[in-house]
Amino acid sequence: MRLSLFVLLLAAAPVSAAHKFEDLAISPKGEAVAAVESEDVAGAHGTIVLRRVPDGRVLRAIDPCAACDYSDPVFAADGRLAFLSRDRSAGTVSLNLADSGGHLRTIATIKGLAEAPRFAPDGKRIALLVTLNATKETGATQAGARQVGEIGESGDEKRIGVFDLSGTVAADAVKPVSPMGRYVYEYAWTPDGKGFVASTAQGNGDDNWWVATIDAIDAATGAVRSIARSNTQVRFPRISPDGKTVAYVGGLMSDYGPVGGDVWTVPFAGGAPVDRTPDLKATITSLIWLKDGLRGTMLAGPDAVLVRIDDKWKISRLWSKPAGLMAGDAKVGLSLDGRVAASTVVDFEHAAALYAGPVTALVQLTHDNDAMPALVHARSVSWTNGGFQVQGWLLAPANADPGQRAPMIVSVHGGPSAAHTPNYIDANGVIADLVRAGYYIFLPNPRGSYGQGEAFTAANKRDFGGGDLKDILAGIDAVEKIAPVDETRLGLMGGSYGGFMAMWVNTQTDRFKALVAGAGLSDWVSYYGINGIDQWMIPFFGKSMYDDPKAYWDVSAIQFIKRAKTPTFIYVGERDIEVPPTQSIEYWHALRGMGVPTSLVIYPGEGHRLRDPAHAADMGKRVITWFDKYVKGGR
C-alpha cells in the first residue's frame, strides 16, 4: 500500500513548472545520457533528449510522435537507442530503434501496454514486457477494472515478447514467448542469450506479486523452470556474467513500487536463497550486475548511496547524497565498465537535475531548474525510541520566524514498507500551500520504514499502529526541542497505510487537533475480504484473517471507534482496489454517528492515487481548509 499523501498532494494544478528528467539511461561507454524531458505541467508533451557527459550539452532530441508519450529509453552495447512511444488514443505502444546516424524505425507495435525493453546479448534481438489488450493501467495503485460479470476468471497478463531487430512486427502479429497464465514482473537476459531470469507469479498480477517466484524462461520455447521460491518479496533479479548465480533484493515490501531489503543470491540451477547482507543497517534499493561485480543503491538514514558489492559481499560506499535518486532501470545508470554513473537527483529544496560522472564524483550536468525557489528549509532529524534509531525530515517554511511558535502537520507515509525521501517542494499542491500558510511539516520514518536495516523494517509485523506510532510521537517530541512548533496546534495526515494511521491515531491519542485520512483502512477484518491485493498481508500478519482473525481485529480502528474525537477529513478513489472505498465509508459512518466532525469525498473513476488534476486540486483545497479550521483556528 504505497500511496503517500505527501507525494500525491504535489499533483495539484501548477503555478510555475519545473523541468522534468524521467527514465534516465546512460550509454555503454558513459559518454551520454538519455532522458524523457518535459515541463511539469498537465498534458505536457515530452521529448527524448540525449546529453553529453560531462557538460550536459544537448546532442540530439528525438520526438517522432507529437501525440505520443515516451518512456523506457535503453542503450544497446553498440550505442543504438530503443524507446517506447505510447499513442493513448490508438491504444498502442510502439517499440522504436534509433541508430547513431539519426535513422529511426519501429520494431514492433503492441496493442495494449508495454514496458522494459532489454537488448539481447547478441545485439540482434530485443525483449519487451507486453500486456496485450489491457483492461487497466499496470499496477494495483491504478483504477481497477469494473467488477462485472464472473469475477476472478480473467485478468491482464504481462508477458515477455522477443523481437528481431532486423524486422517489423505489426500489432496483430505480436506473439509473446512466455506462457499464458504467468505474470512477469521483472526480467533480465541470461548471458548466453538463450533465456531469462524473471520474477513471476501465476494468476492475478496485482495480487500475487507478494508470492512471486524466481524462474528461468526459455527465450525460444517459453518453457518455465523454477529457480527459487523466496521467503521474502523479490525485486531486481539479476544474473551473474558467468550465468551461475542470481542476485536480487529481498525483503519485507508492502507494495511493488517502493523497493527495499537485503541482497540475496540463489544458484541459477536452483536451490535455497541466501541472505548475503543480514546485518546491514541500511536498505538496498536497487541492483545492477556488471562484468566486474554487483553495484547498487541503498538508503542509509537520510542518504541515498551508490555502492559496490564485492565477491565477499562487503559493501563499499562510492557516492552519497541526502537526496532522491531516479533512473530508468534502477536508481542509477552505469556504463558497462562501471566507471561512470548517472541519475536524476532531487531534494526538498532543489528541483530535478541530471547528475553524472565518475562513480565516486557525480556532478550536476543540467541547470534548467536552478532558478526554482526553495519554499522550505529541510533538515534530517534523528531520535531514539524503543531501542531503535529513527530518522525523519522536518520542513520549515523558508520565511519562518524562528522566534514565533507555529503549527505543524505530521505526514505519515504509505507502505508501511517505504520511506519519506527527499522530493522537491514546488509552488503547487497542498504541501506548498501549508508551508506558505506557516505550517511546519514533519515526515517521520518510524519502524516499518526503510533506511535502518531489515530488522527495523520488519519491526511492525503484527504491531500496526503500535511501535510505529510511539516512534512518531517521540519524533514530534524531538522536533519540538529544535524547532518552534506549537504543541497545541498539531495535525496529522497520511494516505494508504498513512490513512490507516490517521484513522488509528484518532482512537489512540488526543494530541492532534485535526486528521486527514486518504484511502485509509478502518477495519482489517472486513478489509481482508474486499481488497484486490490480500496476499500482501500474510507476511505482516503471519496468517490469513480466516486463520487468525484476532490479529487483524486487534489493530482495527473500528474496534476502538468510541474513543475517536478528532475532526477527520476522509477521501478515496471510487475504483481503488488496494483499499476499496467501503473502508472509508465505514469509518466516516461511525464518526458521523458519534457527532465527530467529519467529511468524506469519493472521487469518481480514481484508483489508489488521484490522477485527475481537478480531483487532486479539489482534495488539496479541502485539506487546507480542514487544517486551517481545526488546527490553526482551534488554538
Image (cartoon, rainbow, N blue to C red):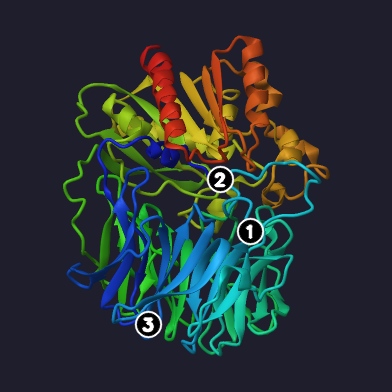
- Residue shown at 40%/28% (left/top)? 409
- Residue shown at 22%/41% (left/top)? 374
> How far apart in space, not on screen, are marks 2 and 3 (Cα)?
35 Å
Residue 342: which quarter of the image?
bottom left
Q: Looking at the picture, which amino acid does disc 1 mark?
A: Asn
Q: Position of residue 508 (x, y in %)?
A: 58, 25
Residue 468 horizontal side relative to residue 377, left or right? right
Mark 2 or 3, nearer chain start: 3
Residue bearing mark 2? 416
- Residue shown at 36%/52% (left/top)? 302
SS class of the residue under badge 2? loop
Residue bearing mark 3? 336
SS class of the residue under badge 1? loop
> How far apart in space, not on screen, are marks 3 and 1 (Cα)?
36 Å
- Residue shown at 58%/62% (left/top)? 111
Q: Which mark is residue 303?
A: none
> In this view, which residue lies farthest toward the top?
595
Q: Position of residue 226 (x, y in %)?
A: 72, 76
On screen, residue 205 above or below 568: below
Q: Position of residue 257 (x, y in %)?
A: 52, 54
Can residue 145 be seen here? yes
Disc 3 crowd rating (10 Å Cα; few below 14, some 14-19, many 20+) is some
Residue bearing mark 1? 133
